[in-house]
Image (spheres, rainbow, N blue to C red):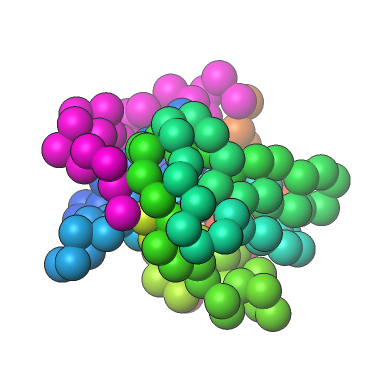
Amino acid sequence: MKLEGLSFPDNLWYAPGHNLWLREETNGEVTLGLSAYGVALYGDIFAFTPKRVGVSVAVDRSFGVVEFAKAAASAKSPIAGTVTAHNEALSGRPVLINRDCYGDGWMIRMQPDDWAGACQQLLRGEQAVAAFNRQAELDGFDPQDESVQALKWKS
C-alpha cells in the first residue's frame, strides 16, 4: 500500500494516531516502529532513547523518546504491555529509522497485555492508508517538500 510515495506494508498493523506500525512475532511479542509517515513528519532522527527492558507501558504512555532536528517527542504506545527488547543498533545509528523504518529501524518489542483486544483498535491495508491520508490532510503534509525524509531514502 502507498500514500503519496510512502510505503505501508500489508503484513503490518498500524496505529495512525501514533504514527506507528506493529508486527506480531511468532513468540507472541509485538515489534513496534515508526511508520514511513512518522519518519516523513519527523525528518532526520538523531536519537531514540527507549524505556528499559521490563518496564510496563500503558496505552498512550511513552515507550521512549525520539529526538529529531527541531525537537524531541515521546513515542507513545497504542498497546499496553511490557518492554522485552529495544533495538540496540539505534543507539549508534538512529538513521536506521529513516532508512529502513519497517526493517532494521524497528524500535522496541513488547509482550502485550491483550493483543487480541489491541488489534481491534489497530488498522491494516486500505483502512490504514485511508487513516494516514486523513491525518496527512489534517497535518498539511506536502510530499513534494524537499524535507520529507522518507522519500529521500527510497531505493
Q: Which residues are magenta?
A: 111-139
Q: Residue at x 66, y 60 (%)?
A: 48
- Tell me what residue is drawn at x 72 percent, y 63 percent: 47
Q: Nearer the viewer, residue 62 or 2?
A: 62
Asked if residue 116 lies left or right of residue 100, the reply is: left
**Vertical comparison of 90 with 136: above or below:** below
User: Measured from the top left, where is residue 125 in percent x and y?
Assistant: 21, 42
**Nearest to the observer: residue 109 or residue 142:** 109
Classify residue 135 as left or right of residue 130.
right
Is residue 136 visible from the viewing direction of this image? Answer: yes
Residue drawn where x is 43% and y is 23% of the image: 134
Residue 143 covered by magenta stretch: no
Residue 6 visible, this angle = no
The answer to which image quadrant residue 78 occupies is top left
> Who is closer to the viewer here, 65 or 154?
65
Image x and y of residue 66, in percent: 68, 52
Picture quarter containing residue 129?
A: top left
